[in-house]
C-alpha cells in the first residue's frame, strides 16, 4: 500500500532531449496518487543523496513542470558516479533518516547497475527500499526485454534530419564528408542517420558501426568506389568502431589511438568530447583516396558531439510520449508490486505500432549492453536493412521528403 | 528594357539554410516579368558555366520550387572557384554563344569578388553583361552598406538554440565545455550563441571572437574564474580566434597550429572540417585549470561543424523572407538599371525593424570582409553588448524561454 514512506527521484548518465518528460511523468503519477509522501528530487543523482541536496518536487507547479518537461538536459542535474560500498552506506543512512522507501533512478545501463548495487546493499542491510530503474539512453543499448529506450527516438530523429541537411551540403560542395556519431557499443544512433534517404544517390552512403569489424583498407576502398561513381561521399561513423585486437576480439579504434588516456567511472573509455577520431579518419582518406583526374579531393570531417542529445524542441512525438509513459508506469509498478524493477518498453503484438511496459530484472539490465542485431545490418556491413527501417520508423516518426533540383 | 538576352543564375561558396529561398525569389521574379528569356541555372557555379552544364529553370514547377526553397544546401550545387583569366574567357564565350546578358551570382564576399573579376573581363571585352551579386553568408561578414546578409540569421538562430540545449547539458554534467563555431574573420555567429541566455548563471559564459586578440593565459584565467564560481563553464569559441604575430598583427591560432596545411582558393586558411582547434583548447584547459578540492575537472570540446549552416527546417522567418527579397530585388534592379551591383539589405530608419535593399558597388563588396564593430563586444572582450542584442534580435527572432529546476 502506497504512502508508507517518502520518494526520491534522480537522473543519471548522459541526458537526452526527453529525459525530463520522464521526470514529469513520474511526478504527475505520484501527485495523482495523492499519497501524502514527500517527493524529493536529488540533485545530480546519488551525489545529491549523499550530500542531502534535495528539491521538494511536490511544490513545483504544474505549468513550470510542463515547461521543464520540454527542455533538454537533466533538470535535476546528473552524475556518472558508480556507488562504492561507502557510498551505499551513506545513501542508505540518508534514506533511513528521511524515511525514503522508494527510489526512482532515471538513466541507462550504468544507472541500472548503480541502482542494482544500492538495491543489494539495502537487501543486505534489511532496509526496506523499492528501487525502480526508469530507462533513458540515446544509444538504445539496453538489453532485452527492452525493445528500445526513451531518448533514442529523439536523438535518432535529430541525427536523421541533420544528416539529410548535411547530405545536401555535401551534394553542393562535393568531395568526401565524414561525420562521427555517439554510440560506444551500439550502432543504433549511427544507423539512424540513414533514415532520411529516399533516392539511390542520397547519403549517408556508408555507415561504420561498432558491431562490424573496422578495416582501414576496406574503409578506403568503400569510399573510393562511391567517390568514383558519384563524385562525392557522405560517411557516418560511430565513435565506437572497433578493430581486431591480438586476442581476436574487437577493441575501439579510438582506444587504440588514445592508449593511456582517461576512462569513465564504469570502465568505459571516454570517446566523446573530442574530434580525434574524425580527424584521424579524415587524414587517412585524404592520404589514400585517389582524386579524379585534374581534381583534388575535398575531405572534411565533423564530430556531432553533445548536440545530438541536447538540441531543444526537435523531438519524436512517440519518443516523448513513451518517455512520459515509463515515468508513470515506474511509479505504478513500485506501489502495486513493491518490488525492484527496470521498466521496459515492449511492442504489443498488433497490426499497428503500440507499446506497453513490463517489469524487467534490475540486475539483468544493469549487467550488460545490447548491440545491433545482425538482421539490422546489411551483409557488406556498411548499410542498414529494411528490418531496421521497420523497427525504427514508428519510434522516430516519418521523415520529411527532400526536394532537389540536381 | 528586359528581354534582350538570356539569364544565368548560380550559387557559390558555403551554402546556408535559406540560400534556395533566394534562388526561388529570383526565379519567381523572372517568371513574373514574363520576359520570354531563358532562365538557366548553372550547376556548381562558374564550373557549370564553363562546362555548359545548365538546368532549365523556367521549366521547374512552382510547387517543386517552393519545396526546394525550404531545403538547405545549394540546390544548383556550389563551387569555391575563383576565375582565372582563362576561366573568364571561357565564361564570356559561353555567355556570348548562348546570348546570356544577365548573370545573378548568389554568395558571399568571395562570390562578389569572383563576379567582379568576370564583370571586369566583360567590360574589357566590351561584351554586354549585367552582373548582380545576391548576398548570402552565415558569417555576416559583408562590408557596409550591407547591414547583414541572408543566411546569418538562420545560422545564428540555430546556434543560439543549440547553445541553449548544450548549456542545459553542461549544467547537468558540470565541468568545462568548449564549443567551436564557424567564422574565420568575423565573430557574428559565435556572438549569436549568447542570445538564448536569460539568467546570470546561464551560458555560454565566455565568448572568444576573431576580433579580440586571443591570449592563452587570459583564456585559462577567465575559465578558472567562472569555474570557481559556478562549478561549470560553457565556452563558445570562433574558429578564427587569433594571436599576435611577430609583425604585431593578428594570425589565426589554427594557422599557427597548422603551419604548412592546405588553404582555400581565395588564400584563406581552411579552418573548417576538423576538430583540431577544439581539441587543442580542451587539452590546454585540462592541463591548466585547477579543480575544486577532491574533484577532477571534466573537460569536453566540440566543433559545431557543417550542421550550423545546413540543419533543415529550423530557420529565422525574417531571415527566410529577406533571403527571398534580395533574390527578387536583384532581378528588378538588373532590368531597371542594367548595371552591375551587389544587392544589400539596409535597415529603414523607423521605430520598428524593417529592411529594404539598395545597390552597392560590386567591386567594393568583393574587396573586403567586415568584422564585429567594437560596440558589439564587451570591454573585457569575452561577451556581447546590448547593442549587439538589439542589432541581432529582429533578424534572428525571439528566443524560447528556458524552464529550469536548478
Image (cartoon, coloured by chain):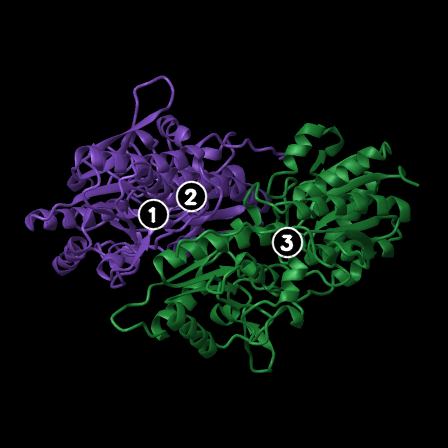
Chain colours: A green, B purple
Task: State the quadrant of the C terminus of chain B.
Answer: top right
Front-most of A32 and B104? Answer: B104
Which mark's residue is nearer the viewer, 1 or 3? 1
Say what secondary structure mark 3 lies in.
helix
Front-most of A204 and B223? Answer: A204
> Badge 1 sits on which subunit?
B
Which of the labelled discs sits on residue A311, or is there none?
none
Is disc 3 on the same chain as disc 1? Answer: no
Q: Quadrant of residue B77?
A: bottom left
Q: Is residue A270 visible?
A: yes
Which of the labelled discs sits on residue B58, or is there none?
1
Q: Are marks 1 and 3 in contact (CB under 8 Å)?
A: no
Locate residue B37 relative to residue B382 in the image: left or right.
left
Relative to A65, say whether A360 is above or below.
below
Which of the labelled discs sits on residue A152, or is there none?
3
**Distance (Cα) linking label 3 and label 2:** 37 Å
Query: Looking at the picture, how far across and down is residue B259, in whole percent?
Result: 26, 61
Residue behind mark 2: B62
Q: Residues within 10 Å of mark 1 (few under 14, many from 20)?
A: some
Which mark's residue is nearer the viewer, 3 or 2? 2
Relative to B163, say whether B43 is above or below.
below
Query: Looking at the picture, how far across and down is residue A360, in whole percent?
Result: 81, 58
Front-most of B12 and A62? Answer: B12
Count of number-bearing discs: 3
Q: Are marks 3 and 2 in contact (CB under 8 Å)?
A: no
Query: Looking at the picture, how far across and down is residue B273, in whole percent?
Result: 38, 58
Amino acid at each position: 500500500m502506497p504512502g508508507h514512506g517518502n520518494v526520491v527521484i534522480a537522473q543519471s548518465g548522459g541526458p537526452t532531449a526527453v529525459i525530463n518528460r520522464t521526470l514529469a511523468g513520474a511526478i504527475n503519477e505520484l501527485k495523482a496518487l495523492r499519497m501524502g509522501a514527500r517527493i524529493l528530487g536529488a540533485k545530480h543523482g546519488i551525489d545529491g543523496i549523499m550530500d542531502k541536496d534535495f528539491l521538494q518536487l511536490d511544490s513545483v507547479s504544474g505549468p513550470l513542470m510542463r515547461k521543464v518537461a520540454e527542455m533538454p538536459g537533466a533538470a535535476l542535474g546528473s552524475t556518472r558516479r558508480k556507488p562504492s560500498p561507502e557510498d551505499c552506506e551513506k545513501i542508505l543512512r540518508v534514506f533511513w533518516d528521511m524515511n525514503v522507501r522508494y527510489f526512482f533512478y532515471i538513466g541507462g545501463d550504468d544507472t541500472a547497475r548503480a541502482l542494482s548495487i544500492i538495491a543489494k546493499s539495502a537487501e543486505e542491510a534489511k532496509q526496506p527500499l523499492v528501487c525502480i530503474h526508469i530507462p533513458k539512453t540515446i544509444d538504445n543499448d539496453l538489453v532485452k526485454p527492452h525493445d528500445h529506450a526513451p531518448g533514442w527516438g529523439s536523438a535518432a530523429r535529430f541525427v536523421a534530419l541533420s544528416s539529410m541537411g548535411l547530405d545536401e551540403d555535401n551534394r553542393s560542395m562535393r568531395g568526401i564528408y565524414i561525420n562521427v556519431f555517439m554510440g560506444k557499443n551500439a550502432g543504433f544512433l549511427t544507423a539512424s542517420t540513414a533514415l532520411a534517404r529516399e533516392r539511390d544517390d542520397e547519403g549517408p552512403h556508408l555507415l561504420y558501426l561498432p558491431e562490424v569489424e573496422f578495416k582501414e583498407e576496406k574503409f578506403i576502398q568503400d569510399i573510393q568506389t562511391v567517390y568514383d561513381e558519384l563524385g562525392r561521399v557522405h560517411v557516418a561513423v560511430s565513435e565506437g568502431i572497433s578493430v581486431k585486437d591480438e586476442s581476436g576480439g574487437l577493441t575501439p579504434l579510438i582506444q587504440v589511438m588514445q592508449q593511456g588516456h582517461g576512462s569513465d567511472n564504469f570502465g568505459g573509455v571516454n570517446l566523446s568530447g573530442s574530434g580525434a577520431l574524425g580527424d584521424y579518419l579524415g587524414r587517412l582518406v585524404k592520404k589514400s583516396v585517389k582524386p579524379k583526374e585534374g581534381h583534388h579531393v575535398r575531405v572534411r570531417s565533423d564530430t556531432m558531439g553533445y548536440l545530438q542529445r541536447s538540441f531543444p524542441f526537435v523531438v519524436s512525438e512517440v519518443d516523448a510520449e513513451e518517455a512520459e509513459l515509463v515515468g508513470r508506469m515506474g511509479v505504478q509498478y513500485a506501489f502495486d508490486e513493491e518490488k525492484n524493477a527496470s521498466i521496459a518498453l515492449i511492442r504489443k503484438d498488433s497490426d499497428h505500432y503500440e507499446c506497453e511496459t513490463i517489469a524487467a530484472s534490475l540486475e539483468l539490465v544493469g549487467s550488460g549492453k545490447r548491440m545491433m542485431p545482425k538482421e539490422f545490418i546489411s551483409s557488406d556491413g556498411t548499410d542498414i536493412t529494411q528490418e531496421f527501417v521497420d523497427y525504427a520508423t514508428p519510434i522516430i516518426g516519418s521523415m520529411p521528403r527532400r526536394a532537389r533540383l540536381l
